[in-house]
Amino acid sequence: MADVEKTRYNDEELAEFKAIILDKLAKAREDYELLRASITHSSSNDTEDTSPTFKILEEGATTLSKDECGRLAQRQLKFIHHLEAALIRIENKTYGVCRETGKLIPKERLRIVPHATLSIEAKKDK
């Protein structure tokens, strides 16, 4: 079989990436809602303070300031938008094509960073 360079991913491959993105999107939206809830409830002293609102933040401090939660929520929202844009590229069948080089971004990179629009080579040139 000749080693012809592909210019786009086939429908089966796109379906695999779509499943990965939808999974990450669901988790990202859940995390975003938890952050939003922590911002709106952080000034109260009721039983909400002991709820699992900060579950995603257990690794570090158990409570964060409203400011820190706001910044995390903004980053999460940006991530959600990037994932949604990736879904649009899947529908347009342009997903996985580096916007700088026009070459396919390796599957391994897309599995880790499914919203990537640059290959590693193009990213290094930035």
Image (cartoon, grey):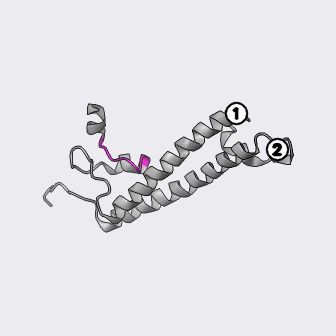
- Mark linked to residue 35: none
Seen at 22% across and 49% down, the residue is 103
Seen at 24% across and 43% down, the residue is 100
Looking at this view, name the residue that lies furthest to the bottom.
11
Asked whether 44 or 63 is in front, the reply is: 44
Seen at 26% across and 32% down, the residue is 125
The three-letter amino acid code for the residue at tag 2 is: Thr
Q: 10 Å neighbourhood of mark 2: few (<14), some, or many (≥20)?
A: few
The residue at which mark 2 appears reads as 50
Write the start and end of the magenta stretch as one range. Answer: 112-119
Image x and y of residue 67, in percent: 65, 34
Height in image: 3 above or below 39?
A: below
Residue 115, magenta (yes or no): yes
Q: Is mark 1 on a helix, strand or loop?
A: loop
Asked whether 90 or 14 is in front, the reply is: 90
Q: 10 Å neighbourhood of mark 1: few (<14), some, or many (≥20)?
A: few
Image x and y of residue 117, in percent: 33, 47
The residue at which mark 1 appears reads as 65
Cα distance between the residues tagged 1 and 2: 16 Å
